[in-house]
Image (cartoon, helix red, strand yellow):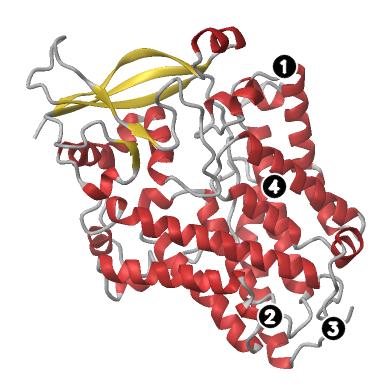
């Protein structure tokens, strides 16, 4: 190792870059398929209306220059194409300066999308992708050894991500402190996966052990990232294993896979070469202009780190918060509070003119969120179903979602094609319903006995009506 770069992380950088490119690809493809109904010109929260209200300085985005659905789709697919090229190694087949520009494009495009995405892009992993993607620009390619400053920046990011999440939990809901959080969380998390029912049915001592292990992983292990190897290697490996456990137990978009991606950058070549048998790339130096750019960017990261570092020790810690419009050096954290019961909004429609007992109501089915009690939850992560996630938040606080939910109901009344593509089952394929309504149910996982008797994964009870019957 010289003063600027190291020869011990070539393969870790390569794996990190390929995994990041894949996550970029999924993010852009998901946006391309969902944006028209959500934020398009005729969407639930249209971008043009947002651009008229919010100036460039508050939401830097290329779409302030010009917006149309066609331009948005073109730039989104451009981001997907470049991500695919980076995935297959295009960044290593061109000069270093060109590789940096290639990594710059998806970052700039995704920041532009995030800054006009409104409530649909208000998740912590959106900013996490932007921050991680920005570091990738300065990580170099096979033309130069991995710069230490960027490897340390990625560890600082991983530290904030894990330690921030641990502090949010231990400072928040008492169920994290008394180790009972997972009595509820597998059942009440935003979007359960196909194994969540089985995780929920684990013995309660196992749940308590899970919570205790989580506290160790998030409150103790992150400090070991800055220790010499092999301690730092072991700490990164522990985080990777923990994240894989979360991948199995739920659907958290690309949050877990991106955390694994960041942790991979902390694994030295001895892990990949010695344990997996991968070859170590030929060594190469670094040019002075590249060193100057990396040092300057590292200084920016250091300066911006003041706010998230202060947030970690603040009495009122912010969760998933960006301190600047480019989403660099953010604050992270999740599930500071745990809901004990699960509520779901169920939307129904009818072709009958009246709304009395004689009306026949048919249920709309979503792709990921619970609906039909007999349907096993599906695995969608790392793909992000934005509407399904917002439906979970809607059930927690119906009033906050009215800005988009009532327009969504109206789209169903006219069988809007773009909107119907976001859901799994439209019970009115031939003609629109005359009326739609929204009900609130309480859901819980069935017991082993109920599962054997009914074949259902969920038991649900009607709580009441959230939106009375609507018609055009």
* Mark 4 / mark 3, whichever is N-terminal: 4
* Mark 1 / mark 4, whichever is N-terminal: 4
Residue 322 appearing in the image: no
What residue is pinned by disc 2? 294
What residue is pinned by disc 3? 283
* Mark 1 crowdedness (10 Å alpha carbons): few <14, some 14-19, many ≥20: some
* Mark 2 / mark 3, whichever is N-terminal: 3
Q: Is 329 left or right of 461, judged from the image as shown? A: right
* Mark 3 / mark 1, whichever is N-terminal: 1
* Mark 1 / mark 2, whichever is N-terminal: 1
Q: Residue at x 83, y 58 (%)?
A: 226
Viewer-side residue, 329 vs 276: 276
Q: Is 92 left or right of 22, judged from the image as shown? A: right
* Mark 2 crowdedness (10 Å alpha carbons): few <14, some 14-19, many ≥20: many
- The label nearer to you, 1 versus 2, is 1
What residue is pinned by disc 1? 204
- Establish if 445 lies above or below 231: above
What residue is pinned by disc 4? 162
- The label nearer to you, 3 versus 1, is 3
Q: Give the Cα separation between the discs numbered 3 and 1.
A: 51 Å
Q: Position of residue 191 (x, y in %)?
A: 50, 34
* Mark 2 / mark 4, whichever is N-terminal: 4
Q: Is 41 left or right of 296, judged from the image as shown? A: left
Q: Position of residue 273 (x, y in %)?
A: 88, 65
Point out which mark residue 188 bears.
Answer: none
Q: Position of residue 462 (x, y in %)?
A: 35, 13
């Amino acid at each position: 190792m010289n003063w600027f770069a190291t020869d011990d992380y070539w393969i870790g950088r390569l794996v990190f870059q390929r995994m990041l490119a894949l996550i970029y690809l999924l993010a852009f493809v998901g946006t391309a398929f969902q944006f028209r109904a959500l934020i398009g010109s005729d969407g639930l929260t249209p971008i043009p209306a947002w651009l008229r209200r919010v100036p460039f300085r508050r939401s830097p985005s290329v779409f302030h220059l010009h917006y149309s659905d066609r331009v948005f789709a073109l730039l989104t697919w451009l981001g997907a194409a470049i991500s695919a090229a980076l995935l297959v190694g295009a960044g290593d087949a061109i000069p270093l300066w060109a590789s940096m520009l290639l990594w710059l494009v998806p970052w700039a495009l995704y920041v532009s999308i995030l800054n006009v995405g409104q409530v649909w892009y208000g998740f912590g992993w959106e900013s996490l992708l932007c921050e991680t993607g920005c570091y990738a620009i300065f990580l170099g390619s096979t033309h130069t050894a991995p710069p230490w400053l960027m490897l340390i920046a990625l560890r600082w990011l991983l530290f904030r991500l894990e330690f921030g999440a641990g502090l949010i939990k231990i400072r928040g809901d008492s169920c994290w402190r008394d180790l009972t959080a997972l009595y509820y969380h597998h059942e009440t998390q935003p979007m359960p996966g196909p194994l969540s029912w089985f995780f929920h049915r684990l013995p309660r001592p196992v749940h308590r052990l899970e919570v205790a292990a989580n506290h160790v992983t998030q409150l103790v292990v992150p400090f070991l990232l800055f220790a010499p190897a092999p301690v730092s290697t072991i700490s990164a490996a522990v985080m990777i294993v923990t994240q894989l456990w979360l991948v199995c137990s739920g659907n958290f978009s690309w949050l877990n896979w991106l955390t694994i991606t960041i942790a991979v950058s902390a694994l030295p070549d001895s892990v990949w070469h010695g344990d997996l048998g991968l070859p170590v790339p030929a060594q190469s130096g670094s040019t002075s202009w590249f060193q100057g750019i990396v040092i300057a960017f590292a200084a920016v990261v250091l300066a911006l780190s003041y706010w998230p570092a202060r947030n970690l020790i603040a009495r009122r810690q912010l969760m998933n918060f960006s301190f600047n419009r480019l989403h660099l050096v953010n604050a992270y954290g999740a599930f500071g509070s745990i809901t004990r019961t699960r509520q779901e909004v169920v939307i129904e429609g009818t072709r009958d003119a009246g709304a009395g007992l004689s009306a026949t109501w048919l249920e709309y089915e979503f792709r990921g969120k619970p609906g039909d009690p007999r349907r096993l939850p599906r695995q969608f992560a790392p793909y992000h179903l934005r509407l399904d996630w917002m439906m979970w938040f809607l059930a927690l606080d119906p009033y906050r979602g009215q800005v988009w939910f009532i327009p969504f109901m109206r789209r169903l009344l006219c069988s809007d094609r773009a909107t119907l593509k976001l859901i799994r089952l439209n019970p009115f394929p031939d003609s629109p319903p005359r009326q739609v309504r929204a009900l609130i149910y309480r859901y819980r996982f069935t017991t082993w006995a109920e599962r054997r008797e009914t074949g259902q994964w969920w038991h649900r009870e009607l709580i009441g009506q959230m939106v009375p019957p609507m018609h055009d």
